[in-house]
Amino acid sequence: MQLTTLLNMEVPDYRELEQNIRYTFINRAYLAESLRHRSFVNEQNINKPADNERLEFLGDAVLNLIVGHSLMEHFPKLKEGELSRIRASLVNETQLAEIARTLSLGIYICLGKGELLTQGREKNSILADTFEAVVAAVFLDGGYHSADVMVRRLFEPIFSEVVPPEADQDYKSRLQEAVQTSSRLTPTYSLINESGPDHDKTFEVKLEICDIEAIGYGKTKKTAEQDAARKVLETLKRQQK
């Protein structure tokens, strides 16, 4: 990676990142801002630049809009509740961090010394937040169409793996019936994370049963549990083949 000096700070050559996201900025100031973590900004003594938290806020809204629109196109018969559940399973910290890793986003993030010492470039929270900020940067620089093209391309492999649910399917009951036929074990559900504002939370639930683990996502704990049960049922089905 080529390096250059700007304002007495070494920064990466953004051309490589632009190649990764397949978007070339008109104004790279948006991209630079999207990559500045607050820990880095807090360590600057004079002329402190803006951190990426405002862009993260905007990027979250843009992501939800684009992914929601795409899901409506992929699954025209699904109702609002199921669309919300699927979107929550796609637009969450873990998933966004994985996308950020495919883009090698971590090496471009400006972090403070403390975060660098604690492997901040590999933290899911930092990677996911920065990816949201980059989405906002593309939106501000190139408009909605540019952000839409980038997000859809990055999410397309994930969309292709989404299995639309059957109407009124109770995956928890189906899983309970399935394991009772082969063992006396009971599925264990545990809430491991919740994110987002109070009016729009996303819940993350871990399900453990028969040496199988699955993580479910949903806008309520119950829908997250159903999502986890669905994933375990799919795993059991694959094992039986």
Image (tube, rainbow, N blue to C red):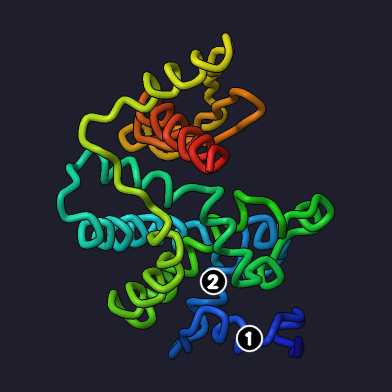
Give the x, y percent position of residue 187. 53, 18
**Would you say 121 lies left or right of 209 here?**
right
Vertical placement of residue 36 versus 145, above or below? above
Q: What residue did someone put label 2 on? A: 33
Quote the CA–CA distance across marks 2 and 1.
17 Å
Pointer 2 local density, CA inside 10 Å: few below 14, some 14–19, many at least 20 = many
**Would you say 4 lies left or right of 233 here?**
right
Give the x, y percent position of residue 208. 59, 25
Label 1 sits on a secondary structure element that is helix
Vertical placement of residue 5 versus 214, above or below? below
**Would you say 215 lies left or right of 3 here?**
left
Q: Nearer the viewer, residue 82 or 149?
A: 82
Q: Nearer the viewer, residue 125 or 103?
A: 103
Q: Quadrant of residue 110?
A: bottom right
Pointer 1 local density, CA inside 10 Å: few below 14, some 14–19, many at least 20 = some
Label 2 sits on a secondary structure element that is helix
Three-letter amino acid code of the residue under disc 2: Glu
Q: Residue sitting at 50 percent across and 13 percent down? A: 180
Vertical placement of residue 196 versus 114, above or below? above
Q: Nearer the viewer, mark 2 or mark 1?
A: 1
Q: Farthest right residue?
A: 117
Q: Quadrant of residue 6?
A: bottom right
Q: Residue sitting at 73 percent across and 55 percent down? A: 120
**N-terminal label among 2 and 1:** 1
Cβ–Cβ under 8 Å for marks 2 and 1: no
Q: What residue did someone put label 1 on? A: 16
Quarter of the image with the N terminus is bottom right
